[in-house]
């Protein structure tokens, strides 16, 4: 074979080897998955679903009945009587035609019966709806792996997939425990009557009913308005109007719910020393991703107590034993009056109930492979579970194409226990104490039959300021569950077969020979 033929043969082999080399090579590309985990109506006090009590009907406590009875009765009834035609037929059986019926029935029922039925219930109805406090969370992740180039992998070589993840859009919302209740009195009675009379089998019936007598009347309800209000007799009707009239003239003093204001009790004649106002707090929270990008946080607060002290009157009582040293009022007669304050100082704390949450999820993954893979720490397997996504172990793939299918979920380590499909939730309750001060100087109000007129310097200071927050009154860490697993984007890892690697070597050798030959020639 001539040198020229050998050169052509070498070039052909080299071309084939190079074609196989580059046809099997793929470049590294990122593979991404966008994940959205959500959980609703989880308890804010421990792992599990929040208790939500919403019965279709109020609970009834009392007695019910359905009774029937009757008086009277009937005599007689269906009686067999000898047929006179049959008797006559027997006198001339062959001349009087066919034999008639020997007996026939006669209804002789006679009498009167009265029946009655009554049914009803008497007692109380208690309606209660409650929510133990719930948490909703939305956790969005963007994940990525970098699949190595084919030319960078050989069978059995440990490689890293370079996994990364980042929290993106997220939200954390909570609903503080709520409860509402109502109590009603129930009296429902109905009756039906029927009378049946018969005379020698001729009967007739008459009946009538009373319908339902009485009904249901609400006595008292709490927090039906969601603001802690107390309502009596349903808030309308004759009973409610009568109660309102009694309250208006001071004959009745009933609580109306929250906010509830109480004057600080003092002996008569010392004036007002201040007030305490109590609220029904509902520190619902709303939040999302914090500045670190690793957890969700939310916080909410609501009024609990407001205390307003009349400082000038307290000092007046302490110094002189009587109130009103720095102000007073007088009736001038004929519809004229005057009230004044040389100085009026109101000072007091505002106490809020604060609730805060920190939610820290850990992105976990299970991997399935279409052929066995050597996973560091697990051996040669076709699937592996319980991996932290950002800390995947190195892996050694066999020759050919291996498809990797990830299933993502959230995990949490609480104490010594790992919980799947959950994240770590920290719940804290504490008090936030603020101060407030109001100062009015040289103010007076003149009352006239034509209206009131105010004069003076008026308000000098009206400010609020932060004081301190208490240590947590309640603190709990637990696994918030309710998140469903998500199947992510699958990807392929391609490793050259041993035969392809052999051709790699031949190709590079032949390329070297061709280059050397050309240099010699």
Image: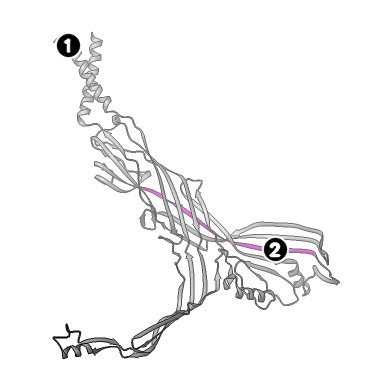
- From the image, give the main secondary structure of the stretch colored magenta: strand
Q: Quadrant of the C terminus?
A: top left
**Percent x, y of residue 334:** 86, 71
- Find residue 426 and report its horizontal and vertical position in percent: 46, 57
Say which residue appears at 24% left-offset and 11% top-offset: 518
Magenta range is 342-364
Quarter of image, res 80: bottom left
Q: Which residue is mark 1?
A: 5
Query: Residue 328 placed where, x, y %?
Result: 80, 69
* Residue 471 visible in the displayed image: no
Residue farthest front in this picture: 95
Query: 346 above or below 92?
Result: above
Dividing the image into 4 quarters, which one contains the N terminus? top left
Residue wearing tag 2 = 347
**Mark positioned earlier in the residue sequence (1 or 2):** 1
Location of residue 419 (image quadrant): bottom left
- Position of 317 with respect to 55 (left or right) is right
């Amino acid at each position: 074979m001539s040198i020229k033929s050998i050169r052509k043969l070498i070039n052909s082999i080299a071309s084939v080897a190079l074609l196989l080399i580059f046809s099997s090579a793929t470049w590294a590309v990122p593979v991404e998955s966008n994940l959205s985990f959500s959980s609703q109506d989880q308890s804010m006090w421990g792992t599990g679903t929040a208790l939500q009590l919403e019965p279709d009907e109020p609970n009834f406590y009392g007695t019910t009945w359905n009774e029937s009875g009757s008086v009277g009765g009937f005599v007689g009834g269906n009686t067999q009587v000898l047929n006179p035609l049959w008797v006559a037929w027997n006198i001339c059986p062959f001349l009087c035609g066919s034999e008639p019926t020997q007996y026939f029935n006669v209804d002789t029922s006679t009498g009167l019966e009265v029946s009655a039925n009554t049914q009803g219930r008497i007692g109380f109805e208690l309606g209660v709806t409650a929510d133990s406090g719930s948490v909703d969370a939305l956790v969005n992740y963007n994940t990525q792996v970098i699949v190595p180039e084919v030319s960078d992998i050989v069978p059995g070589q440990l490689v890293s997939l370079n996994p990364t993840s980042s929290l993106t859009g997220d939200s954390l919302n909570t609903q503080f425990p709520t409860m509402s209740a109502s109590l009603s009195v129930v009296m429902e009675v109905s009756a039906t009557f029927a009378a049946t009379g018969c005379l020698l089998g001729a009967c007739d019936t008459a009946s009538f009913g009373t319908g339902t007598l009485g009904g249901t009347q609400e006595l008292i309800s709490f927090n039906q308005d969601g603001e802690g209000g107390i309502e009596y007799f349903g808030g309308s009707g004759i009973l409610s109007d009568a109660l309102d009239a009694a309250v208006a003239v001071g004959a009745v003093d009933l609580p109306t719910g929250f906010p509830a204001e109480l004057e600080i009790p003092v002996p008569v004649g010392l004036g007002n020393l201040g007030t305490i106002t109590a609220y029904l707090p509902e520190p619902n929270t709303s939040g999302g991703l914090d500045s670190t990008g690793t957890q969700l946080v939310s916080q909410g607060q609501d009024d609990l107590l407001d205390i307003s002290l009349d400082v000038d009157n307290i000092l007046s009582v302490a110094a002189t034993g009587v109130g009103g040293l720095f102000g007073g009022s007088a009736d001038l007669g004929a519809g004229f009056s005057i009230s004044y304050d040389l100085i009026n100082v109101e000072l007091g704390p505002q106490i809020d109930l604060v609730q805060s949450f920190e939610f820290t999820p850990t992105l976990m993954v299970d991997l399935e492979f279409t052929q066995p893979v050597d996973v560091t720490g697990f051996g040669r397997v076709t699937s592996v579970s319980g991996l932290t996504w950002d800390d995947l172990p190195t892996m050694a793939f066999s020759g050919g194409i291996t498809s990797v299918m990830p299933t993502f979920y959230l995990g949490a380590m609480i104490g010594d226990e790992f919980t799947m499909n959950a994240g770590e939730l920290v719940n804290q309750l504490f008090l936030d104490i603020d101060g407030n001060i109001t100062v009015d100087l040289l103010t007076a109000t003149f009352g006239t039959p034509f209206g009131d007129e105010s004069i003076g310097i008026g308000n000098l200071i009206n400010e609020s300021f932060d004081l301190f927050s208490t240590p947590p009154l309640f603190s709990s860490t637990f696994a918030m569950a309710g998140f469903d697993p998500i199947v992510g984007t699958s990807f392929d890892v391609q490793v050259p077969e041993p035969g392809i690697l052999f051709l790699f070597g031949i190709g590079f050798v032949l390329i070297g020979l061709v280059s050397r030959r050309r240099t010699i020639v």
